[in-house]
């Protein structure tokens, strides 16, 4: 980024996890220029999440759904944004559509990776070296610097702010404010079934922690409500009263606050995984068809578990072979052991990757 830039428009990504990781870019921009004004053009659902990022001055709702072109709408928005006189636009999506609003807004410097055909729309067009920047967060972060610049040895982790008063009320509302610790489970994944650890495995972990005196809260969107209900149904009958299904019940900002109070979190590779990392909770992540070599949780209190299988990681939404052994054969005992290691007194909470 130009050192003279006083204001920047970020065109944000479309997914929860990617938006969380984008906070690393925002932090780097602020480190370079503490007075910079950072505005983010993003899907409306992400505005409560952006409100938890103190680096962001203003979040602007993109009035279009993911994938829609609608040139007139983009043109009108671009014209409205001209009055802001941004010095630079940084585009996190690689799509042609994402480059239109900054161009219509006549932002003088428009920076992004080459992606789809965007010649002319971008005038600071970068050619991505995937070996140099293997992680998505590195690709976001690199846009804060000159082309081909060496990134800092350590990138800042995302760190969402917490509304303490709201959290206290939510814990009371959902009866999670007692002396018992609680385990947060995040069994959903919008990507598809190949990222979802089996419900029976989640239930086994939940039952083991309930037997120790913990409570269990299951998080997710409305799409995950049935999965959460199945996990609770798989518990021993006497354990079910100690588990609560919050899927589809909490707003995104409420999930942020509640997850920040969890004693430990178990999650698939999902947006909620990135949120749990960004509120620095002890976190166990189970990977199936995707890889932590691209979008790992960015935190220190983490254990990553993934089986080494001959067919993966395949990056498919559904198992092409139908057996899903990368997740079926990842035993609950390993997850329970990882929780124990993370919460053990004196544990240094350094992230570890286990590939066996």
Image (cartoon, grey):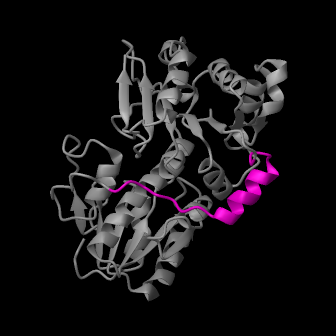
Locate residue 141 relative to residue 231 in the image: left or right.
Answer: left
Residue 15 in sight from this viewpoint = no
- 217 over 313 or under it: above or below: below
Locate residue 5 relative to residue 91 in the image: left or right.
Answer: left
Name the outermost residue toward the front.
345
Query: What residue sits 75% from the left and 45% below the top?
Result: 176
Tell me the quadrant of the picture where the C terminus can be found: top left
Residue 257 in sight from this viewpoint = yes
State how many labels appear: 0
Residues 125 and 190: in front is 190
Tell me the quadrant of the picture where the N terminus can be found: bottom left
Residue 303 percent coordinates (x, y) = 44, 32
- 351 over 43 or under it: above or below: above
Residue 52 percent coordinates (x, y) = 55, 64
Locate residue 286 relative to residue 222 in the image: left or right.
Answer: left
Q: Quadrant of residue 266 in the image?
A: top right
Residue 209 percent coordinates (x, y) = 66, 26
Query: What residue sits 34% from the left and 47% below the top?
Result: 136
Residue 48 percent coordinates (x, y) = 61, 63
- 240 over 244 or under it: above or below: above
Locate residue 150 relative to residue 307 in the image: left or right.
Answer: left
Q: Which residues are magenta?
A: 156-177
- 52 over 94 or under it: above or below: below
Residues 76 and 165: in front is 165
Query: What residue sits 77% from the left and 37% below the top?
Result: 244
Q: Quadrant of residue 156 in the image?
A: bottom left
Name the outermost residue toward the bottom.
83
**Residue 163, magenta (yes or no):** yes
């Amino acid at each position: 980024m130009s050192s003279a830039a006083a204001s920047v428009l970020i065109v944000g990504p479309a997914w929860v996890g990617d938006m969380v990781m984008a906070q690393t870019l925002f932090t780097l921009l602020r480190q370079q220029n503490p007075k910079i004004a950072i505005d983010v053009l993003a899907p409306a659902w992400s505005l409560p999440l952006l409100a938890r990022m103190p680096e962001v001055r203003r979040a602007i709702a993109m009035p279009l759904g993911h994938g829609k072109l609608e040139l007139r709408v983009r043109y009108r928005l671009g014209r409205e944004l001209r009055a802001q006189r941004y010095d630079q636009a940084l585009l996190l999506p690689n799509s042609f559509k994402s480059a239109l609003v900054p161009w219509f807004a006549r932002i003088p410097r428009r920076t992004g990776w080459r992606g789809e055909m965007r010649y002319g729309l971008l005038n600071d067009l970068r050619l991505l070296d995937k070996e140099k920047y293997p992680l998505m967060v590195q690709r976001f972060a690199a846009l804060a610097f000159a082309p081909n610049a060496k990134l800092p040895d350590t990138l800042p982790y995302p760190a969402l702010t917490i509304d303490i008063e709201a959290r206290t009320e939510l814990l009371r509302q959902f009866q999670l404010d007692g002396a018992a610790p609680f385990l947060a489970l995040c069994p959903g994944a919008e990507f598809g079934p190949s990222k979802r650890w089996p419900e029976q495995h989640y239930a086994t972990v939940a039952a083991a922690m309930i037997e120790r005196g913990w409570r269990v809260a299951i998080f997710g969107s409305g799409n995950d409500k049935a999965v959460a209900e199945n996990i609770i149904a798989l518990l021993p009958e006497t354990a079910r009263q100690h588990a609560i299904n919050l899927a589809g019940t909490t707003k995104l900002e409420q999930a942020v606050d509640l997850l920040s109070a969890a004693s430990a979190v178990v999650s698939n590779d999902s947006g909620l995984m990135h949120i749990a990392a960004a509120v620095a909770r002890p976190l166990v992540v189970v990977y199936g068809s995707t890889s932590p070599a691209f979008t790992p949780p960015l935190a220190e209190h983490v254990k990553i578990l993934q089986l080494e299988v001959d067919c993966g990681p395949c990056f498919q939404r559904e198992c092409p072979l139908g057996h899903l052994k990368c997740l079926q054969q990842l035993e609950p005992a390993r997850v329970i052991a990882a929780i124990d290691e993370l919460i053990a007194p004196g544990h240094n909470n350094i992230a570890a990757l286990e590939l066996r």
